[in-house]
Image (cartoon, rainbow, N blue to C red):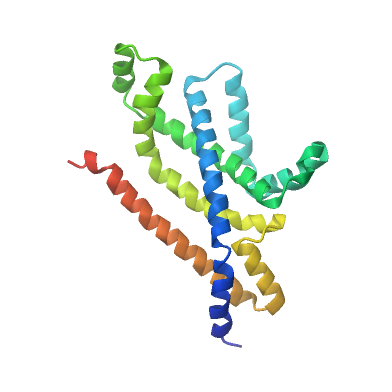
Amino acid sequence: MRGLDLDYMLGLVPVILRYVPLTLTMATIAMVLGLILASLLAVERVFRVPVLDWFVMLFISFFRGTPLLVQLFLFYYGLPQILSFLTRLDGVTAAVMGLTLHFAAYMAETIRASIIGIDRSQWEAAQSIGMKQGQMMRRIIMPQAARVAAPTLVNYYIDMIKATSLAFTLGVTEMMGAAQKEAAGSFLYFETFLVAAIIYWIIVEALSQGQKRLEIYLNRAYAR
């Protein structure tokens, strides 16, 4: 039984760290786009627009009910066979698309639950002063729903960062892709993937601490 090659592991750290910006960039872009889409889906689910509601429910059901890896393969390998203009789609774009749509389906339900959880008196008060639905949602309901949903949405961002590790299956050299290449060249699979796991762990723990601080900040007005 051989011991860990600590020198190899230490030398591998800067190699994998070079790809942290790409990992975080993919996750952040997907999070921003996903939040926008999820908010639109959530508002539609609250007001239940005829016909459109059926398509939204189908979208949420599909992306929540199928594995993310299958969706990534569908975007990167499947759609270009049907839509020729997507043959130029690169792995990073396909990964961001997959992450955006997959997590938007989950975040939409979180935001919807936060919206309907707002006390009915808030809705009635806004209507009583003549606010239209758009104004009411933008000025009264959504800011309060955002406070409730924020901790869970940060969790989705953390999950999104971890899910970027699937992008290497599309040929993207992010953290997991870099680790895979290094492991294939050195055959030190345990050490390589242990280093990658620790780096992911550190990133997630840092974000988790930020999440706790965010919860305290958002709840400060309600702690009195």
Q: Which residue appears farthest toward the left when viewing the image?
A: 224
Q: Which residue is more in the foreground, 26 or 211?
A: 26
Residue at screen point 53% across, 55% down = 24
Name the image quarter holding residue 81: top right
Q: Position of residue 47 (x, y in %)?
A: 48, 20
Residue 74 spot, x, y in % from top left: 73, 44
At 77% from the left and 45% from the top, the residue drawn is: 88
Horizontal side, residue 47 vs residue 73: left or right: left
Q: Can residue 220 be seen in this view?
A: yes
Say above or below: 21 vs 127.
below
Q: Quadrant of residue 130?
A: top left
Q: Which residue is drawn at 57% across and 66% down?
A: 18
Q: Which of 113 and 212 is in front in this view?
A: 212
Residue at (58% x, 57% y) in the render: 22
Q: How many marks?
A: 0
- Which quadrant of the figure contains the C terminus? top left
One can see residue 4 in this view: no
The spot of residue 39 in percent (x, y) is 49, 32
Query: Left or right of 140: which side holds 51?
Result: right
Residue 52: x %, y % from top left:
60, 21
The quarter of the rendered structure image containing the N terminus is bottom right
